[in-house]
Image (cartoon, helix red, strand yellow):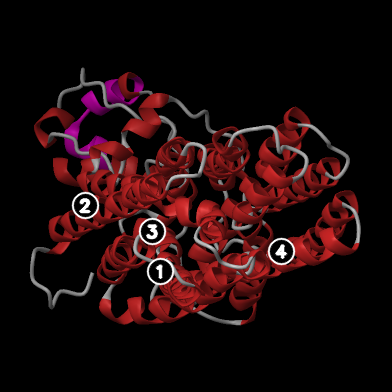
Amino acid sequence: MTSSMITNEIHPHTDVDPALVANVGMQVPDTKDYVVGPPDKLSEVKSSLGSSVEASEETLGMQVEPSAPAITFPDGGRQAWLCVVGAFCSQFCSFGWLNTCGVFQEYYLQHQLNGYSATTVSWISSLQTLILFTGSLIVGRLFDSYGPRYLLLAGTLLEVGGIMLTSICKTYGPILVCQGIVASMGAACVFNASVGSVSSWFKKKRARALGIMSSGSSLGGIVFPILIRRLTVQTTFGWTMRACGFLVLGLLIITNLTVTSNVTPRGKWIPLYPRDLWVHFKDTNYVLLATAFALGFVGFMLPFTYIVSSAIFHGMDENLANYLVSFLNAASIFGRIIPGIMADKVGQYNMNTVGIFLAGVVTLALWIPAQDTGSQIAFAVLYGFFSGTFVALIPACTAQISNIQDIGTRVGLMFFCLSLTSLAGVPIGGAIIGDATSEKRWNGMMAFAGSFLMVGGIFHWVARVKLVGPSLKAVC
């Protein structure tokens, strides 16, 4: 066996100088927690290199285990599509709940938290985004270790419990904890367990399946705002939140019964050390993709958060303005499914680059000059479509450059990176708006959002060129 073959056996994502493999004193990082190969492979290595391998084995600290069987992607079938159905429900309850942040932002400023600034109140939605994505890092590792079952159960209890507790909160601190932290921790569990599970069933049709799954969050972004607006008028805030909690509970029961993984989990917790994460950042393709998503997410959540307040400031009827989030999410359903189907043919990277760029274009060219009702609605529809493409293809693009057995960790780390920038984006936008009485300040926030989306699109194109070159004909 050649030294290059040994390198590939150690870790598919680690670049190791072949000349060093024969050196029994080398220290190869990140090998001890990975499957090296079956015993017959080790015997072949020993016969090729002699007794020095025995010393190397001890030096490297390798744990020799039977390798996992090759993964077969059925790309369909009853169990695979049931998984998509359950994941659709989980997205409705997790990211779909997060998509209501614009409605809650406006409601809290007019009712319980009317003495607080827009920036302070926006920390509730910022924490939701942060925890949903930051939690991906740990949840992804748990998924690779144990599979989706316990994550879905824990997520259901936390999210439903957090929403129910919010129903009895009346001040800023408890709302921040229950809605911003507890419910979001549960959403992180069900969100990431579903993404990893669907990715394990599909390869050729992965973008399509993930697009359908992701459209659940858009449907949630339609239903929850309408439900919240109608019920807060007809009953109390407390009963409104309880109704939302019961809806989430029912859908997550379906998720728990249908979502399964096609990958056999490792069956044990593998400690998450910084060096385990650093391995992925040695992959230039991964770094460029993470940079593109992180920069894009600085501006991504701003329209979701401030579109209602912006429309009211520009004179739109308040009742109609509250439906803008629903218009945005309705368009996002098509923006997730249609480009997902197309991405399986023209390439995930190609389709997502177009989606990010056009989301930035409509933000700069349409949201800023939008003054009348028609242009506000047009922006909501167009931004919903193109931003839906952006979000839906994040897991597909990540899976394209990843080993499927590391999919939970790789996707989780990707979402962790963009969570840090999304946390900063919404409060910075609120700070730019200030007291929300100046059109110049509103335009500044919109320019801020659109500019970062455009920069994210540029980096996504660079990542695509690094992967397949500049040819526009390349499917990537």
- Whether 134 is drawn above or below 262: the answer is above
Label 1 crowd bin: few (<14), some (14–19), many (20+), radius 10 Å? many
How far is mark 1 from mark 4, CA to CA?
Answer: 21 Å
Mark 3, residue position:
399
Kindly report which numbered mark, 1 or 4, lies closer to the viewer in this rendering. Answer: 4
- Whether 368 is drawn above or below 153: the answer is below
What is the three-letter code of the residue carrying label 1?
Thr
Q: Name the spot of residue 212 as percent of width and height, x first.
A: 53, 75
Kindly report which numbered mark, 2 or 3, lies closer to the viewer in this rendering. Answer: 2
Left or right of 318 on screen, residue 280: left
How far is mark 4 from mark 3, CA to CA?
Answer: 30 Å
Residue at x 20%, y 44% (from the top left corner) = 284
Kindly report which numbered mark, 4 or 3, lies closer to the viewer in this rendering. Answer: 4
Label 2 crowd bin: few (<14), some (14–19), many (20+), radius 10 Å? many
Left or right of 212 on screen, residue 147: right
On residue 224, the disc is: 4
Q: Name the spot of residue 223 as percent of width and height, x first.
A: 70, 69
Residue at x 8%, y 71% (from the top left corner) = 471
How far is mark 2 from mark 1, CA to CA?
Answer: 16 Å
Mark sitting earlier along the chain (2/3): 3
